[in-house]
């Protein structure tokens, strides 16, 4: 029997996240062949009067393609997928799979070809700026393992997170958006971390279920050359099939001057991908009350309650700081007490301590007020 929570999720994705209207076309792209949710999405799209299109992909097949990738070939794939994407009003990207490390043995050069063709032409140039889009994961045994939970417990967690009342969160975020839009200087403090930068005149954007499921962040970006200091991340950071740990970055005038991790050579190769990879494209504060611990899946980890993430690489157009890169790598720090604590200051005023907002106008974003 199909879990009824799948129908609720499908309804929310079609009617809240992408707001599908009568006569609009939605591309449902599924990596992982999760038939139940795809079928429910098709049914909900029809109920809304829309036209669903379905594209099914598989991570193991994708790996085979990447192993033989050439710029010429992937340029043609990008052209094909771009032509499809141009014709859509909305996009739902459903990601799942049995192995988070399926691409771990794909050469870095092949991954770079993919990101510079399909990633740039389809995602950056068409999907993000020109469609209503949302991306999400689907629960699998491998995700439960990463979360260190039983399959049943993880499914309960998943649906709590994904079927949260995001309209309530959306309203609660307004105060944080307003405060960030008035802020110049930000300071982040924690264990082996003291980082300062400006977000002056760079818009703050709330994320409450329209682009990601799960969701729960407000993001901006540092003024490109303003970041100075050191940050030591306390969560694992997967990137292209490899999980980096103990990542420590030192910034001078906005640029990563020194980077170390469990594989310092590999992480520096990523930061040398292009000029923008050593600058920051996003600063965001996570507030999802149901996500408490990292599970090496960035769609979840970047929304962790009491966290923030700092992102080397490409900035977003709606929080534009002028940085461009094929890299966009969200790195997460949790500031709740069990992770070592920490503070966030806006213009020398403490606004969050040990993961909890401490000024009255932001208390609505503390977890007990969002559940």
Image (tube, grey):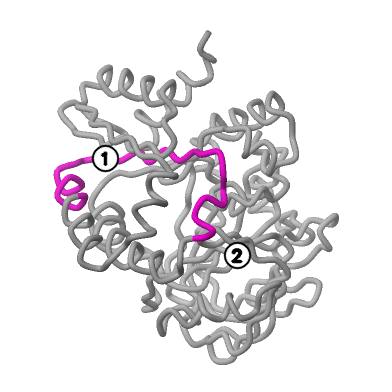
On the image, the x and y values in percent for residue 298 come to: 56, 53
Vertically, is 293 above or below 329? above
**As displayed, is residue 251 above or below residue 178?**
below
Where's residue 289, x and y in %? 67, 41
Q: Quadrant of residue 23?
A: top left
* Of the image marks 1 and 2, the number of the one nearer the N terminus: 1
Residue at the spot 71% in from the left edge and 58% down from the top edge: 359
Residue receiving disc 2: 331
Helix, strand or loop for disc 2: strand
Circle 1 crowding by C-alpha within 10 Å: few under 14, some 14–19, many from 20: many
- Which is nearer the eye, 188 or 142? 142
Choose top left, top right, bottom left or bottom right for residue 195.
bottom right
**Is residue 178 toward the left or the right of residue 361 in the image?**
left
Q: Which residues are magenta?
A: 81-105
**Circle 2 Cα neighbour tier, 10 Å, few/some/many (<14 / 14–19 / ≥20):** many
Q: Position of residue 348 (x, y in %)?
A: 69, 77
Q: Residue at x 67, y 80 (%)?
A: 260
**What residue did someone put label 1 on?**
90
Which mark identifies residue 60? none
Secondary structure of residue under mark 1: strand
Quadrant of the image occupied by residue 197: bottom right
Q: Estimate the spatial distance between the alpha carbons at disc 1 and disc 2, rounded to whole Å.
A: 28 Å
Residue 164 locus on image (x, y percent): 57, 32
Q: Is residue 82 magenta?
A: yes
The quarter of the rendered structure image containing the C terminus is top right
**Residue 257 among magenta residues:** no
Q: Taking 142 as reference, is 75 left or right? A: left
Q: Which residue shows up at 54% across the image and 67% down it?
A: 283
């Amino acid at each position: 029997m199909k879990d009824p929570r799948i129908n609720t999720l499908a309804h929310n994705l079609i009617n809240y996240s992408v707001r599908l209207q009568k006569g609009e076309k939605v591309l449902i792209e599924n990596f992982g062949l999760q038939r139940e949710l795809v079928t429910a999405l098709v049914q909900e799209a029809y109920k809304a009067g829309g036209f669903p299109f379905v594209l099914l992909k598989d991570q193991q097949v994708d790996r085979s393609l990447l192993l033989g990738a050439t710029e010429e070939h992937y340029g043609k794939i990008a052209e094909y997928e771009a032509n499809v994407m141009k014709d859509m009003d909305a996009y739902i990207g459903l990601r799942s799979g049995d192995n988070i490390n399926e691409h771990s043995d794909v050469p870095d050069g092949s991954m770079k070809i993919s990101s510079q063709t399909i990633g740039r032409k389809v995602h950056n140039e068409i999907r993000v700026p020109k469609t209503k889009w949302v991306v999400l994961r689907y629960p699998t045994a491998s995700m439960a393992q990463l979360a260190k939970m039983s399959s049943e417990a993880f499914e309960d967690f998943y649906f709590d997170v994904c079927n949260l009342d995001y309209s309530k969160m959306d309203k609660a975020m307004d105060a944080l958006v307003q405060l960030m839009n008035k802020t110049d200087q930000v300071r982040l403090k924690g264990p082996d971390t003291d980082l300062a930068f400006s977000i002056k005149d760079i818009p703050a954007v709330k994320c409450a279920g329209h682009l990601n499921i799960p969701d729960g962040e407000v993001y901006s970006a540092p003024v490109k050359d303003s970041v100075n200091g050191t940050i030591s991340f306390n969560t694992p950071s997967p990137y292209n099939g490899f999980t980096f740990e103990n990542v420590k970055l030192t910034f001078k005038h906005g640029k990563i001057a020194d980077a170390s991790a469990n594989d310092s050579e590999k992480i520096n190769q990523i930061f040398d991908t292009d000029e923008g990879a050593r600058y920051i494209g996003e600063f965001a504060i996570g507030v999802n009350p149901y996500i408490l611990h990292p599970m090496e899946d960035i769609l979840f980890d970047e929304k962790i309650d009491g966290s923030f993430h700092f992102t080397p690489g490409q900035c977003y157009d709606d929080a534009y700081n002028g940085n461009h890169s094929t890299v966009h790598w969200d790195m997460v720090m949790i500031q709740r007490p069990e992770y070592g604590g920490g503070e966030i200051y806006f213009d020398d005023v403490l606004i969050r301590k040990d993961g909890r907002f401490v000024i009255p106008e932001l208390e609505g974003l503390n977890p007990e007020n969002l559940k």
